[in-house]
Image: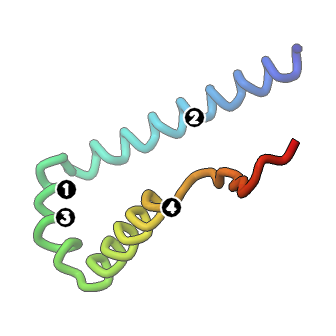
């Protein structure tokens, strides 16, 4: 029980440090959510490669949703 507790604490601490550093880097760059949204709508979404990837992902998700999750057995006659 002690080893998983120590490992969890170490991972949680490292995650907190990483998120803090990313947050400081992000805030120091002058970025904001409105700038990111504007860049996405004017730049990235206009890229044909991004559009094709999004279309393929949507088609794959729709095809996966249409498939049966589990196959049910088919019984043609009463077998006892």
Earlier in the chain: of badge 2 and badge 3, it is: 2
The quarter of the image holding the C terminus is top right
Disc 2 to disc 3, C-alpha distance: 27 Å
Query: Which residue is located at x 19 percent, y 56 percent?
Result: 36
Earlier in the chain: of badge 2 and badge 4, it is: 2
Image mark for residue 67: 4
Q: Left or right? Give the position of 43 relative to 70.
A: left
Q: Is label 3 in a helix, a strand or a loop?
A: helix
**Residues at marks 1 and 3 touching, judged by CB atoms closer than 8 Å:** yes
Q: Which residue is mark 1?
A: 36
Numbered disc in front, either 4 or 1: 4
Earlier in the chain: of badge 4 and badge 1, it is: 1
Disc 2 to disc 4, C-alpha distance: 38 Å
Earlier in the chain: of badge 4 and badge 3, it is: 3
Earlier in the chain: of badge 2 and badge 1, it is: 2
Q: Which residue is mark 3?
A: 40
Q: Is label 4 in a helix, a strand or a loop?
A: loop
Image mark for residue 15: 2
Query: Which residue is located at x 20 percent, y 72 percent?
Result: 45
| Image spot of residue 7 (x, y percent) | 78, 27
Q: How is the image coloured?
A: rainbow
Disc 2 to disc 1, C-alpha distance: 24 Å
Numbered disc in front, either 2 or 3: 3
Which one is nearer the viewer's eye here, 26 or 73?
Answer: 73
Residue 37 vertical position relative to residue 20 in the rendered view, above or below: below
Query: Which residue is located at x 58 percent, y 52 percent?
Result: 69
Q: Residues within 10 Å of mark 2 (few under 14, many from 20)?
A: few
| Image spot of residue 19 (x, y percent) | 47, 37
Residue 71 vertical position relative to residue 57 in the rendered view, above or below: above
Query: Which residue is located at x 42 percent, y 62 percent?
Result: 61
Q: Is label 1 in a helix, a strand or a loop?
A: helix
Q: Quadrant of residue 71?
A: bottom right
């Amino acid at each position: 029980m002690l080893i998983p507790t120590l490992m969890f604490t170490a991972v949680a601490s490292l995650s907190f440090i990483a998120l803090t550093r990313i947050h400081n880097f992000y805030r120091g760059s002058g970025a904001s959510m409105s700038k990111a949204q504007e860049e996405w709508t004017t730049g990235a979404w206009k890229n044909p490669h991004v559009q094709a990837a999004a279309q393929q992902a949507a088609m794959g998700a729709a095809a996966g949703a249409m498939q049966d999750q589990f196959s049910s057995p088919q019984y043609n006659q009463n077998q006892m």
